[in-house]
Image (cartoon, helix red, strand yellow):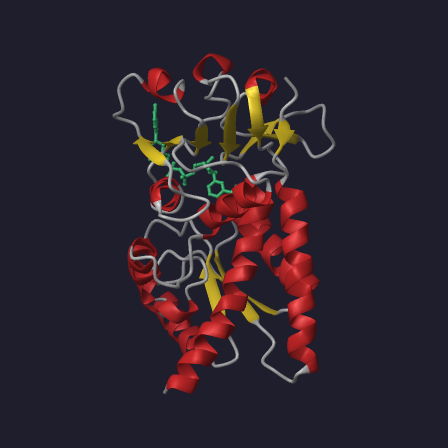
Amino acid sequence: MEPTIVSGTEVSNKIKEEIATEVQKIKTSGGKIPHLAAVLVGDDGASRTYVNAKVKACEKVGFGSTLVKLPADISEADLLAEIDKLNNNPDIDGFIVQLPLPKHVDEQKVTEAIAPEKDVDGFHPVSLGKMLLDLPSFLPATPYGIIQMLAHYNIPTEGKHCVVIGRSHIVGSPMSVLMARNTYPGNSTVTLTHSRTQNLKEITQSADILIVAIGKPEFVTADMVKEGATVIDVGIHRIDDASRKSGFKLLGDVKYDEVAPKCAFISPVPGGVGPMTIASLLKNTLLAVQLNSETLIEN
Ligand code: NAD
């Protein structure tokens, strides 16, 4: 069977075009141009790549963007002070703090210091609580991206068995909530699996939709997947490969070559969930402008 490739590149390009059109309209009407800031602490190669991609995406759609680069040895207090500045800067509609942070900084404290109305990564307890209550809010960027992929390809979700592998706060757990919501995409019967799950293979074999965020290269093999399933691969791993100019190749959490022939739909790595995460961040920033201007009117 030839699977349909769930192309995050394609869907994210479409979303970016829609956002660019929206920015043009805002410009024409003299409204506030959305402005996203990204905070990068230290000089980790992967984090730098992710942040640069986010800044570049902002420029492409016509958003303002600011990169706040801070040294790896910044104190927690100084980092919190930088966050406070962004919270109080009226020109910044939303901002993210790229994770992971250096060991001496409490990530949870930093996440909670971000003003909920600027929390475009959707990691703040207020954002996650609103998601649970179906209130308008910022959905965490990666799960939101996956939701948009499923919708774009009209992948049936109602009454389906959706198995999520991984229960991280930024991917697996919110993903399981979104797939169970009373809407489309959603209305699935969800099983959330994790490191203590027993008989994982038996569970994944009954998945109509399998969303994999375990963080282990090529963990999911063909024998774990049902014929005709939809498989969404969140994992991303840089593996050294001397035969490539870049010196590395990217692998997902799914053994793509052997799993793909069994699938009705499958997302590749690269070109799958990754670009969608950035598109969601842009969508959330646009939403921040809208939500915050409504708040101002109400006040
Ligand atoms: P994480 O490392 O925080 O969590 C991994 C989860 O896997 C844990 O909840 C753990 O309980 C579960 N797990 C471990 N062993 C298991 C087992 N044997 N059976 C079932 N579950 C098991 O991961 P994360 O932050 O959610 O990221 C997962 C992957 O997705 C990573 O490769 C990460 O790089 C990638 N990622 C990609 C994007 C993107 O935009 N493409 C965004 C976020 C994360």
Q: Is residue 74 above or below residue 289?
A: above
Q: Is residue 133 left or right of residue 102?
A: left
Q: Is residue 181 above or below residue 258?
A: below
Q: Quadrant of the C terminus?
A: bottom left
Residue with the most extreme right position: 245
Q: Residue 105, can we see it?
A: no
> Residue 169's x, y, as percent?
34, 46
* Residue drawn at (56%, 72%) of the image: 35
Q: Quadrant of ligand 1?
A: top left
In the image shown, does 173 or 162 lie closer to the viewer? 162
Q: Is residue 31 left or right of residue 292?
A: right
> Residue 125's x, y, as percent?
29, 59
* Residue drawn at (34%, 15%) of the image: 202
Residue with the most extreme top position: 223
Q: Quadrant of residue 128?
A: bottom left
In the image shown, does 188 or 164 lie closer to the viewer? 188
Residue with the most extreme front position: 159
